[in-house]
Amino acid sequence: MKEPIKVGEKIKEIREEKGISLEELSKITGMSPSVLSQIENHMLSPSLGALVKLSKALNVPLGKFLGEKEEKAFTIVRKDERKPATRFGTKEGVGYGYSYESLGHGMEGRHMEPFLVSLEVVPEHLLQPSVHDGEEFIFVLEGEVEVELAGHKDTLYPGDSIYYHSTIPHLVRAKGNREAKILAVIYIG
């Protein structure tokens, strides 16, 4: 597998290139300057929803955070070409309970971002609902996945799927005592 992309470093690099301070980015995204600093310094792993917010705020395709340089009219991603994203870079780092690999990198002008996501078992009190623009589609590959949105809580099993507007506060996590794997497609428009 390839060396993981250090997403926080890419975010910081793009923010600085654009001459945007942490405080300015905070006002645009609604994320606190301390959270943004923790993301940039690999102390906190950004959720996929946070990446969507940051890409819109910095006016760059989400793929830029994954180190994309060249885009084409189509892309084929072989299993050994997936781009894993670093969850965090230090032992003190905190993840959102998952790690992800980009499955659509290199496609120009895309409006969807497909990911293979590994959901870790995380204590419920550590997880926060996500809200961002767009839509999400999730297909469960392995394990059990609990979803909460719009006052509804349900368990999904391998072969089950859910499709929802990402503007609804939502929480997706592994249920039980083992990791789950999902295919997640985020439409960012």
Image (cartoon, helix red, strand yellow):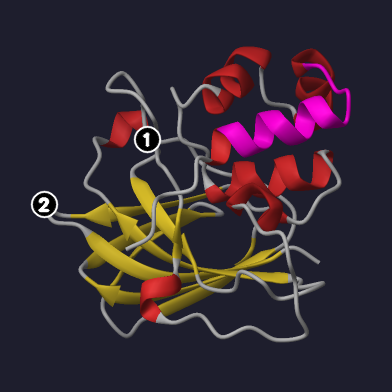
- Circle 1 — which element? loop
Dominant secondary-structure state across the stretch colored magenta:
helix
Which residue appears at 60% of the width and 13% of the height?
Answer: 34
Q: Is residue 59 magenta?
A: no
Location of mark 1 (residue):
95
Q: Nearer the viewer, residue 173 or 181?
A: 181
**Can you tell which quarter of the image residue 163 is in?**
bottom right
Image coords of residue 71 (percent x, y):
75, 71
- State the separation of the CA atoms marked 1 and 2: 17 Å
Give whichever of discs 1 and 2 has the lower sequence position. Answer: 1
Image coords of residue 87 (percent x, y):
40, 40
Provide the residue span drawn in magenta. Answer: 9-21
The relative height of residue 46 versus residue 35 in the rendered view (above or below) is: below
In screen coordinates, is 134 left or right of 78? right
Q: Is residue 16 magenta?
A: yes
In screen coordinates, is 49 left or right of 183? right
**Can you tell which quarter of the image residue 136 is in?**
bottom right
- Circle 2 — which element? loop
The tag on residue 177 is 2
Badge 2 local density, few (<14 within 10 Å), some, or many (20+)? few
Amino acid type at image mark 1:
Gly
Which residue appears at 52% of the width and 21% of the height?
Answer: 41
Q: Nearer the viewer, residue 189 or 65?
A: 65
The relative height of residue 156 versus residue 12 in the rendered view (above or below) is: below
- Quadrant into which the C terminus falls: bottom right
